[in-house]
Image (cartoon, rainbow, N blue to C red):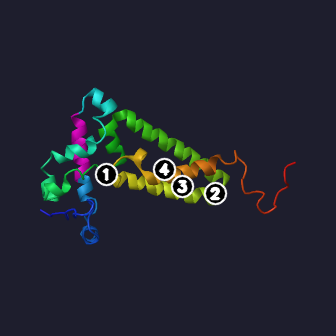
Amino acid sequence: NRVVPQQSHSAGETTVSDRYETIATGTMLFSRRVLWQLACLELADYNAIEWLFGRGAGHSIIFYDALQEPLDSIYSDPALRLGKLSPHNLFLTDLLDGGIVRLVADLTFLLVTFLLTVRLIRLRPYTGLPIALILGLCLMNSMISNRFGLLYDRYDYIFTALLAVESGASDGEDIHENCHGDSPTPT
C-alpha cells in the first residue's frame, strides 16, 4: 500500500520534492486515476435531469469532501484535502457540474477553436503552427490538471483570443503582405 505524497499547506499544491518523488516512482497519474474513477462513480448515480444539467457549479469539488475511502490512503489528512480535490479533467468537471449542456458548450468551443486554427495554419503557417501547439498544450493540460473546466481556463482564453485575432484579421489576405513592399499598394 503505497502512500502518494500529501498536499502541502501552501495553496493546496504539492511540493517540488513530492512531485519529483511521484514521477520517480512511476505513479505520476495514480492519484488522477483514483480521482477520475470516483468522478465516474459519481456520474453513475446521476438521474436524467442531472445528466442534462449537472449538479451545479462546484459539485466536482464538493463531492470529494464527503468521501473517505480510497482518498484516505492517498491523502492521509482530510483537513488538507478539504475543498482542494477535483477531477482535474475538463470533461469530467463539466459533466459533474453542468451536465451534457456544459459539455456541449466545451465541445463547441473546441470545434470552433480547431476550425480557426486550421484556417490560420493554411493562411499563415509560421503564425498558426505555434498557436496550434500552444492551444494543444492548453487542451492537454485541461485534460489532466484543470480544476474548473476548459471554459474557465484563463490560459486557453489567452491563446484562443490570440488565435481569433490572427485568424480574423485579414479575411484570407496576409495582413503582413505590405510590410516589406512585396506587393503593390491598393489604390
Q: Which residue is mark 1?
A: 88
The disc, 1 or 3, on the residue closer to the chain's N-terminal end is 1
**Residue at far front of view:** 10
Mark-to-mark CA distance, 4 and 3: 13 Å
How much space separates mark 1 and mark 2, taking CA atoms?
A: 32 Å
Mark 4 packing: few (<14 Cα in 10 Å), some, or many (20+)?
Answer: some
Q: Element at badge 4?
A: helix
Residue at point 45% right, 57% down? 137
Comparing labels 4 and 2, the label whose residue is closer to the camera: 4
Q: Is residue 69 left or right of residue 28?
A: left
Q: Nearer the viewer, residue 145 or 187?
A: 187
Distance, label 1 to label 3, CA atoms, is: 22 Å
Residue 102 is left or right of residue 15, and the answer is right
Q: Quadrant of the N terminus?
A: bottom left
SS assignment at label 3: helix
In the image, residue 124 sits, relative to residue 98, either above or below, namely below
The picture places residue 58, in percent across and down from the top left corner, at: 28, 42
Element under disc 2: helix
In the rendered image, residue 135, in percent from the top left (x then y), is placed at: 49, 54
Kindly report the distance in space between the C-alpha atoms of the residues bearing marks 4 and 2: 21 Å
Look at the image and say whether residue 161 sits in the magenta stretch.
no
Identify the mark nearer the N-term, 2 or 3: 2
- Residue 41: say if magenta: yes
Name the secondary structure under disc 1: loop
Residue wearing tag 3: 132
The mark lying in front, picked from 1 and 3, is 1
Query: Residue at point 14% right, 52% down?
Result: 70
Residue segment shown in magenta: 34-45
- Mark 4 or mark 3, earlier in chain: 3
Mark 4–mark 3 CB contact (< 8 Å): no
Task: Name the kind of residue labelled 2 in the image.
Answer: Pro
